[in-house]
Amino acid sequence: KIAARWPGNRITFGFLGCSLCREPMLHPALDDQLKSALELKESVCSKALQRLQFDGMDKAPELEPDGQYAGDPTAFALSRYVYYLCFQCNKPFYGGAVACVQGAAAELSADQLLCFPCAHPGAATSCAKHGDEYLSYKCKYCCTVAVFYCGPSLGHMCDLCHSNIAPLDARIASGTLPPCPCGPNGEALPPGTTCPLGVSHPPAPEEFPLGCGVCSNLRSF
């Protein structure tokens, strides 16, 4: 059970519980087998709690005394966010919100689950202070900062493009999506308009990091 770990692509930790009572398995005879799994759990839980705070959800109604996850922000964070194990570096990475990625990642094979630095070697994918956990990205369809991440198969999107994925994918396939500068929903911006992002970036639908979101937020105050 420990060696098999979790079913599917999403990292879960049910395999660390006893098959009979579901309590965490702790025994000196299992120390060597559990060591790496417990270290992984610590890493994922830490990342999920930081993201909960980053998203402003650390005071959500679900955490109130009468809420579903009262007194257990870790369980709440793990219920909201998906983490995968990178096939190349073997480290956990944020895979998006549960509501966005359910079903999508099931279609991916293990070797397609890559964190952004491994999937884009050589790109500026890390902050000296905050690492790669809070990078902001360009929307894959337009010249807008993304606010959704729907996993490795769908990528980063702004709010409006997130609501129109199928038509935009069809426009990419047909080559009718406007080049930069492009507004949400694939709207071509008036001639002479400079790119709203103010940076040089690859064309849609290539993923592109814009820098550390935490540092950007700090600079805005």
Image (tube, grey):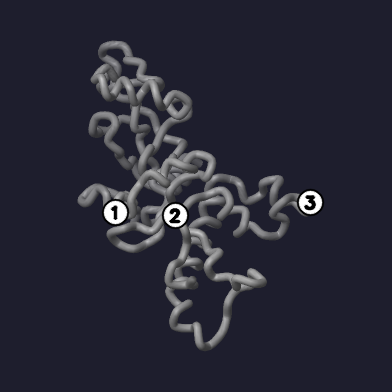
- Front one among 30 and 161: 30
Task: Name the residue type under label 2.
Answer: Gly
Q: Position of residue 44 (x, y in %)?
A: 48, 61
Q: Name the mark on residue 66.
A: 3
- Disc 2 on helix, strand or loop? loop
Q: CA distance from mark 2 to mark 1?
A: 13 Å
Left/right placement of residue 82 relative to residue 90 reads: right
Q: Distance of mark 2 from mark 3, alpha carbons?
A: 32 Å
Mark 1 sits on what residue?
111
Gap in angstroms between the C-alphas marked 1 and 3: 42 Å
> Which residue is drawn at the image coordinates 52% and 56% (left, top)?
48
In which quadrant of the rendered view does residue 177 lie?
top left
Determine if residue 168 is in view.
Answer: yes
Which residue in the structure is indicated by mark 2? 8
Check disc 3 and give the amino acid type. Answer: Asp
Q: Mark 1 vs mark 3: give the one in front.
A: 1
Q: Quadrant of residue 4?
A: bottom left
- Badge 3, how many Cα within 10 Å: few under 14, some, many 20+? few
* Picture residue at 38% right of the left edge, 21% below the top: 167
Residue 129 visible, this orientation: no
Whichever of labels 2 and 1 marks the residue nearer the N terminus, that label is: 2
The residue depicted at 33 percent of the width and 40 percent of the height is 210
Query: Seen from this angle, which residue lies furthest right?
Result: 66
